[in-house]
Amino acid sequence: MFTQAAKLLSVSRDAKTIKGEKVGILTGVLYLAPHTLAGYQVCPSATEGCMAACLYTAGQGRYSNVQTARLNRTRWFFEGRESFMATLVVDILRLVRKAN
C-alpha cells in the first residue's frame, strides 16, 4: 500500500529550513495531516487553540497534492509503521550525512 521509495523528511525545500541553513542549522521536517482529516491523532496533546491555528493549509499546504502527500504519510505512519520507520531512519541518516 505504501512505498519505501518516498522521502519523508523535507530538507532544504521550504522557507523555514532554508532560512535556518543561512545561520548554520540544517533541519528535516516531517509534515503530517491533522486527525480531523487523516482519522488518526498525531498530536494527542493539542489544545483547542492549537487545532484552530493548525498550519496544515499554510504555505505549500494550500496545494491539494501537498495535502494528499501529508495525508498519505500520516496513514502510512499508522497503517504501515514498520516500513514507515525504516524509511524514516534512511531519511535521518541521509540528513546526518548532509549535515556532516
Image (cartoon, rainbow, N blue to C red):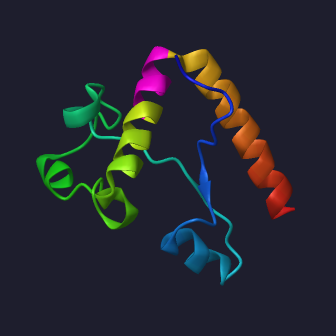
- Which residue is located at x 35 percent, y 46 percent? 67
Q: Does residue 12 lie above or below 88 as drawn?
A: below
Residue 6: x and y in percent read 63, 37
Residue 21: x and y in percent read 66, 76
Q: Nearer the viewer, residue 60 or 98?
A: 60
Q: Does residue 42 lie above or below 29 as drawn?
A: above
In this picture, residue 94 sits left or right of residue 20:
right
Residue 51: x and y in percent read 18, 49
Does the magenta run of residues contain 52? no
As drawn, the residue found furthest toward the bottom would be: 22
Residue 85: x and y in percent read 63, 26
The image quarter containing residue 40 is: top left
Q: Nearer the viewer, residue 44 or 89?
A: 89
- Which residue is located at x 44 percent, y 20 percent? 78
- Which residue is located at x 32 percent, y 38 percent? 43
In this picture, residue 35 sits left or right of residue 96:
left
Q: Main secondary structure of the magenta part?
A: helix
The image quarter containing residue 87 is: top right
Q: Which residues make up the magenta segment?
A: 74-79
Q: Quadrant of the C terminus?
A: bottom right
- Give the mark count: 0
- Which residue is located at x 63 percent, y 20 percent? 83
Q: Nearer the viewer, residue 24 or 12?
A: 12
Q: Does residue 88 lie above or below 61 as drawn?
A: above
